[in-house]
Image (cartoon, rainbow, N blue to C red):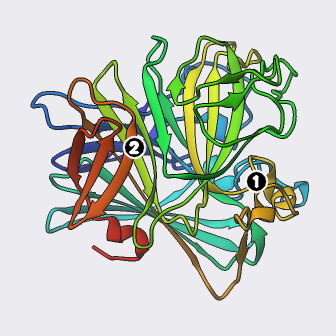
Amino acid sequence: MFAQDIIFCQPSWVMESTTVRMAVTHLGAHMGPVQFCGKREGSSIEPYCVSPWQCEENTVPGGQSEKVLRGDFFCLPFGYSDPELECPSHGRTAGERWSLDGYKTWNGVHELRISMKNALGPANVVRQYFLRDGEDVVYDRTTVIGLSGAQTVGHHAVLRVPPAHASLLISTSPQLFGMTYPKQMDDANGSAVQSLAIGAQFESLLQVPLAANGSDTTDLTIYPTDRESTDLLQLAVAADEGQPAWTAAVNIKEGYLWFALRDVALLPSTLIWIENRGRKASPWNGRSCILGLEDVCSYFDLGSKVSAETNAFSSRSINTIHEFKPDAPLVVSYIQGATQVPYGFGRVNTVECRGGYATFTDAMGATVRLALDSDFLFGKEF
């Protein structure tokens, strides 16, 4: 099924399979809301955030990603924009209007195709979304054509967070290197509240240095915390050959697992954006409790120019910039999904993709399996 609708005050394309219903905004191509049917009859899972200022008068300029902020969106460039590029933070792809190229269905596969001309200089960008009947999965493929030079790229998923403390259990593929934001967090009025140490390295999300005392740490596998704050940290991760890198969040209050899978060669790091009522300026107004799990090739959100310089990640041979060539399109494939988990299922410890299924195992050995084709991440066509 395909339709167009106004959803949370944004014109959107809506596509549907037997198991997933999702909307994509005309502005910024933000994928959300999304309803996954899950395994329990009559139930649905809605893991993504829709920012609370939708349908309000606010101060966010047109073309900014925050105007629409919801679900997941593709950023080119990721983070701050060099003024010479004359585009907003996270790029035109995240805040300006996309064009509908078409929608088609065949053999239980549903495809929405949209595009943006001159998305960054002369570059054109094409995005394809695929749903397959019977799968609680969204397949997403972005193709960047005609771009040259060093630029950052990334997916920017934002999750809805239940109000109760420690509702989400966060985990990723094995960590290679981790670091907190290298400078003071800020919003337009300088009123963001930061809780983590600045530029601190860490070996595990279980022990991330706090700002208050150099020896104090916090467990950031559990969210939300009891601290009002806005923080950003970056993890570089590893993946076995032929296996995707993964990011996962288990909602223990509502009994489901959300995940994202990608090719670690293209998106080697995950940014964790903690927005726990710490941003006081408009339109945030201290009311947003959301979690960004953003898979990127970037150095934090500091933009392409800074990411191209030597930094704590690139000095460890972890890419923070992509070198585009005009005759070699970049194709970024991405998989997201959600499924119910049994009572007591904990933080995801491992993910294995084999034979058309993904198996998620927690620290106690409990498993959840769902159908998906991870070969899509490495170029497979449907």
Q: Position of residue 32 (x, y in %)?
A: 43, 39
**Label 1 or label 2, whichever comes before in sequence order:** 1
Q: Give coordinates of residue 339: x percent, y percent.
A: 26, 39
Q: Amino acid at mark 2?
A: Asn
> Residue 199 placed where, x, y %?
83, 39
Instruction: Examine the rendering and report whether any part of residue 31 can be seen.
Output: yes
On the picture, is 168 further left or further right than 67?
left
Q: Which mark is residue 233?
A: none
Q: Are marks 1 and 2 in contact (CB under 8 Å)?
A: no
Say which of 226 and 51 sits in front.
226
Using the image, determine if residue 166 lies above or below residue 301.
Answer: above
**Quarter the C terminus occupies:** bottom left
Q: Secondary structure at mark 1?
A: loop
Identify the residue under disc 2. 349
Task: Name which residue lies at 74% across and 21% down.
Answer: 216
In the depicted structure, whether residue 169 falls above or below residue 116: above
Within-10-Å neighbours for mark 2: few <14, some 14–19, many 20+:
some
**Residue 141 quadrant:** bottom left
Classify mark 2: helix, strand or loop.
strand
Residue 75 in view here = no
Marks 1/2: CA distance? Answer: 26 Å
- Crowd rating for badge 1 (residues with CA inside 10 Å; few <14, some 14–19, many 20+): many
Q: Position of residue 286 (x, y in %)?
A: 68, 12
How many numbered marks are there? Answer: 2
Q: At label 1, which amino acid type do we have?
A: Tyr
Residue depicted at x 66% and y 80%: 146
